Amino acid sequence: MKVRASAPSNIALIKYMGKVASSGNKPTNPSISYTLDHLITQVELEKIDGSEDRWEPLKEQGFGDIELSEKGRAKFLTHFALLKKEMNGHGSWLIRSANNFPSDCGLASSASSFAALTRAAAAAFKPGFDEKTLSKLSRKGSGSSCRSFFTPWAVWEDEGARAADVPYSGLLHAAVIVHAGVKEVSSSDAHVRVATSPKFEGRPERAEQRLRELVSAMRESDWASSYKLIKAEFEDMHQLFESSAEPFRYRNKKSQAVVDACQHIWNFKNDGPWVTMDAGPNVHLLYRPDQLELAEKMVKHFRDSHVVMTSWSGLK
Ligand code: DP6
């Protein structure tokens, strides 16, 4: 028996950073994300003889090979064990997965991977589960994956995510890959370490307030105020990393140069892309569909020094 499922990635504009201890990835603050429908993980489950589940890369045209670290593999298999338990699944399974984007391009695949695995398990064991239930289950594997069940916008507070009513859609996404190597501090570790920063005091309230302000700015189609809030948010998160008891940083000079170049465009035109960064050095840009010309110009410029992956013209 074989089943398949896929799920997209997402980029948070108000970030999930900090977890309630021993809660199965319940966040200390609500978050909101835009779903990246072009960045997809495909998972195939095949029932096998034997006493344990295994993982291997899925060979699929148009999909790159994933290399999972020992830790990454263990986290994936542990989540599958939990899904089997919650869905009354039985037997041993071979899990195969692949991303439609290169694994070495510095884009996180944990959201799409865990959401796709959760969907595949439901296809095998519990086809009747709705997306809300799947979102809650997926959260237990990797928090940010719970937002990948809804598109184009998802809000997540507490147990699982739901679709958010925001008027922007069809946004153009560009990821400027300033560094594609493996991170020294995983996002799971970052969640623990931020709590040691003196700036973590008041962080849940700050994030919640910013989320409220961002949703209302977006509902008023106020792109410029949204840009300011989104920028303040990722800077807040990175300051937590950099001021934790054992400080660590993901931002480097190249990331800062990309962020500054975007600010320069904003200063000049009073318009530009939304800019955000996750727990890594790469910079994510979102443009409205009517900004395509600007997006192409900026991407061409960034491609002089970096790989840029876009939702409209792929990876270069
Ligand atoms: C910075 O979902 O990767 O991307 O729950 O430990 O698997 P775990 O963490 P993860 O954290 C992602 C954090 C972030 C911000 C976000 O996506 O909201």
Image (spheres, helix red, strand yellow):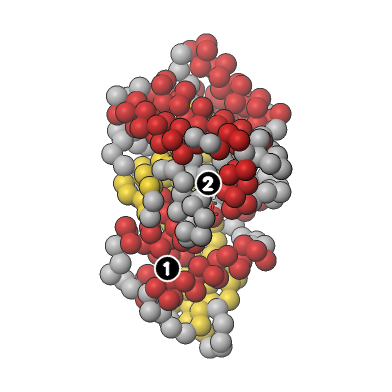
Report which quarter residue 50 is drawn in. Answer: bottom right
- Residue 105 visible in the current orientation: no
Q: Residues within 10 Å of mark 2 (few under 14, many from 20)?
A: many
Quadrant in which the N terminus appears = bottom left
Q: Position of residue 278 (x, y in %)?
A: 56, 40
Q: Which residue is mark 1?
A: 120
- Residue 295: x and y in percent read 50, 27
| Ligand 1 within 8 Å of the CB at mark 1 | no
Task: Tell me the residue at 62%/52% (across/down).
Answer: 189
Kind of residue sitting beneath label 2: Gly
- Screen quadrant of the C terminus: top right
Residue drawn at point x = 70 percent, y = 33 percent: 252
Rendered image: mark on residue 48: none
Q: Residue at x 71, y 43 (%)?
A: 246
On the question of residue 298 being in view, the answer is yes
- Where disc 1 sits, the SS reads helix
Q: Secondary structure at mark 2?
A: loop
194 relative to 215, above or below: below
Q: CA distance from mark 2 to mark 1?
A: 28 Å
The mark found on residue 18 in the picture is 2
Which of the pair 163/49 is nearer the observer?
A: 163
Viewer-nearest residue: 71 or 181: 71
